[in-house]
């Protein structure tokens, strides 16, 4: 797990080492264990290292294979690298290191762009060919690892962090109209390749790209989801589906133990993280460290789930750590959390995840986490209405969109009123082949788009800010593919995740399954009280915000007058959504 950066020029000048160094300085928390920088004429690659696999200097990056004429910077973890290494050794390749980075290099030499289809893991990387001068880039199927880039007239910059790219300079920082619309409407999700800034793009998940010496850049998708059962699965009973669910999850959890350092678990006390602990202890009975966080209760809304995480910790004898955060002391950490966001992430539990990561990093460098289960196994309340609707788009938008286009126009400057980009995006995604039923269309959209640019990005940003690697077994691509084959009724029954619950009964105590669905946001952000309300008010009414003119002041004043009245269908604060965008822009000097 690391941070990567680079500059590749299309003109006759050499790459700017200082620009790459500036990007790397921004990413020190992503890789505090080492740094590397290599320049060869018109290209330069930079790397910040967090030592997880092959702790020796032999795995240092950028990694240059002089014999093959290839250089790489890589962020992530390839869990099946030992098997691929054996396969490559059978083809005659020899290795000078013991980690996964060199396996990617050899795999690219052996199989070309198809190498990414062989990888099981999370990854974002860039490989430069010495002889041709072309560069090959790729991002993992579920977008767990980020890849931001700027394509200018004379050069191409890339980085694991959007603020890192800003440090390189020469970025068009005008707001992207599509991104403004989706941020304000599509529950603060900005789908790739867009970011809030017109000059910065992100490589979409499951994409690979070639950058040619003349600057031409071609992106292609190498993986997507197909919903529906195989002929063999059409004969499955409920028991068969339950066993198959357990089997695919066992493999995913086991794969994510590949490391040369201990691996812990973020234990919320819910089904998903509890099941990970149970499956992990099935495989390895040695002491497992688990970590939980909680806030105070506000408006009768519980801020922690310690009673449930305690059940799992006691059942499996884990070394359990509980962190209680009083939100009155969280203002400074919230500012630090925002400063570490590559893009504005509005979820109330961001600062909780940030604080939890800071604490966990004192004990371990790698954790497994339960993100993704709701999206792929049908845990959200907007899925059941999709089962029989004749209006897939309308039903989904009613449940998921934070505001309709009319309210969007009320909220933002008229220069952004051009089109209802969010509705168009969802409509086009629903029309794509591979998901015929309305509920499958919704779950595919969430799995391929929303999940990537909300929960997954939240995990990466907040854990990496603490120099902590997070691994998400529910986003093993084999698990995601399997979940797409599970019939909808086995996913949404019993208030969601039915088949996952049935699998859970065979592994973990029923008390953590037969319970109300929990969610512990930071209450003071959901209801915007005290210092947090003052923070939002200042962000939206200061001179910088007024000069920007993004938000219409009558709309801002309406939200400020009664923050608790203006809540989105998904129970988020509309005021915090606006304030966070301004805070992120101002924090980054934009």
Image: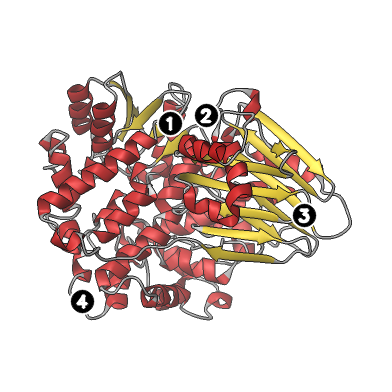
| Observer able to see residue 361 | yes
Q: How far apart are the alpha carbons under marks 2 and 1?
A: 8 Å
Expressed as whole percent of the image width and height from the top left, the position of residue 382 reads 24, 64
Marks 3 and 1 close (CB-CB < 8 Å): no
Q: Find disc 2 in the rendering and name its residue.
A: 53
Q: Nearer the viewer, residue 399 or 406?
A: 399
Marks 4 and 2 close (CB-CB < 8 Å): no
Q: How far apart are the alpha carbons under marks 3 and 1?
A: 34 Å
Q: Is residue 100 above or below residue 15?
A: above
Q: Secondary structure at mark 4?
A: loop
Q: Nearer the viewer, mark 3 or mark 4?
A: 3
Q: Secondary structure at mark 1?
A: loop
Marks 2 and 1 close (CB-CB < 8 Å): yes
Looking at the image, which residue is at 30% across and 61% down? 565
| Observer able to see residue 139 | no
Q: Earlier in the sequence, mark 2 or mark 3?
A: 2
Looking at the image, which residue is at 17% across and 24% down? 315
Q: Quadrant of residue 29?
A: top right
Extreme residue toward the right, this view: 12
Q: Find disc 4 in the rendering and name its residue.
A: 389
Expressed as whole percent of the image width and height from the top left, the position of residue 297 reads 25, 38
Q: Find disc 1 in the rendering and name its residue.
A: 258
Q: How far apart are the alpha carbons under marks 4 and 2?
A: 48 Å
Expressed as whole percent of the image width and height from the top left, the position of residue 457 reads 46, 49
């Amino acid at each position: 797990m690391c941070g990567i950066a680079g500059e590749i020029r299309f003109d006759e000048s050499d790459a700017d080492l200082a620009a790459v160094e500036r990007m790397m300085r921004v990413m020190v928390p992503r890789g505090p264990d080492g740094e590397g920088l290599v320049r060869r004429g018109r290209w330069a690659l930079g790397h910040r290292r967090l030592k997880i696999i092959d702790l020796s200097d032999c795995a240092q990056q950028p990694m240059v294979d002089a014999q093959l004429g290839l250089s790489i910077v890589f962020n992530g973890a390839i869990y099946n690298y030992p098997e691929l290494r054996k396969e490559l050794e059978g083809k005659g390749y020899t290795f000078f290191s013991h980690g996964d980075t060199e396996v990617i290099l050899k795999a690219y030499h052996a199989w070309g762009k198809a190498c990414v289809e062989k990888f099981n893991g999370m990854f974002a990387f860039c490989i430069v060919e010495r002889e041709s001068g072309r560069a090959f880039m790729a991002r993992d199927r579920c977008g767990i690892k980020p890849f931001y880039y700027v394509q200018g007239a004379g050069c191409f910059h890339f980085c694991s962090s959007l603020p890192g790219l800003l440090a390189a300079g020469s970025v068009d920082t005008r707001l992207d109209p599509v991104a403004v619309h989706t941020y304000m409407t599509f529950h603060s999700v900005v789908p790739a390749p867009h970011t809030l800034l017109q000059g910065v793009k992100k490589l979409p998940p499951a994409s690979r790209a070639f950058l040619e010496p003349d600057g031409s850049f071609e992106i292609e998708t190498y993986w997507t989801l197909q919903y529906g059962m195989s002929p063999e699965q059409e004969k499955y009973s409920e028991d068969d589906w339950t066993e198959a669910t357990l089997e695919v999850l066992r493999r995913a959890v086991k794969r994510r133990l590949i490391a040369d350092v201990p691996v812990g678990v973020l234990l919320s006390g819910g089904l998903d993280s509890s099941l990970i602990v149970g499956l992990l202890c099935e495989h390895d009975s040695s002491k497992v460290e688990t970590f939980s966080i909680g806030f105070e209760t506000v408006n009768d809304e519980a801020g922690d789930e310690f009673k449930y995480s305690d059940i799992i910790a006691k059942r499996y004898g884990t070394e359990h750590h509980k962190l209680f955060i009083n939100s009155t002391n969280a203002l400074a950490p919230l500012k630090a959390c925002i400063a570490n966001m590559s893009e504005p992430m509005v979820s109330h539990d961001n600062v909780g995840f940030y604080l939890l990561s800071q604490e966990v990093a004192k004990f371990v460098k790698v954790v497994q986490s339960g993100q993704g289960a709701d999206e792929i196994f049908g845990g959200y309340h907007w899925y059941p209405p999709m089962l029989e609707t004749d209006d897939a788009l309308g039903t989904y938008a009613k449940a998921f969109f934070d505001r309709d286009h009319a309210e969007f126009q009320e909220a933002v400057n008229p220069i952004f009123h051009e089109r209802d980009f969010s509705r168009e995006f969802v409509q086009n995604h629903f029309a794509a082949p591979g998901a015929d039923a309305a509920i499958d269309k919704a779950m595919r959209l969430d799995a391929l788009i929303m999940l990537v640019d909300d929960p997954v990005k939240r995990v990466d940003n907040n854990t990496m800010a603490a120099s902590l690697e997070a691994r998400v077994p529910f986003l093993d691509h084999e698990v995601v593919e399997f979940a797409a084959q599970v019939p909808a009724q086995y996913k949404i029954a019993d208030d969601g995740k039915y088949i996952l619950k049935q699998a859970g009964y065979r592994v973990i105590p029923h008390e953590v399954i037969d319970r109300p669905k929990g969610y512990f946001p930071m209450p003071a952000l959901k209801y915007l009280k005290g210092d947090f309300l003052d923070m939002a008010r200042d962000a939206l009414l200061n001179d910088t915000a007024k000069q920007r003119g993004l938000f219409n002041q009558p709309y801002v004043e309406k939200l400020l007058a009664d923050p608790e009245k203006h809540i989105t269908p998904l129970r988020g604060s509309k005021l915090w959504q606006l304030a966070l965008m301004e805070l992120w822009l101002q924090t980054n000097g934009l």
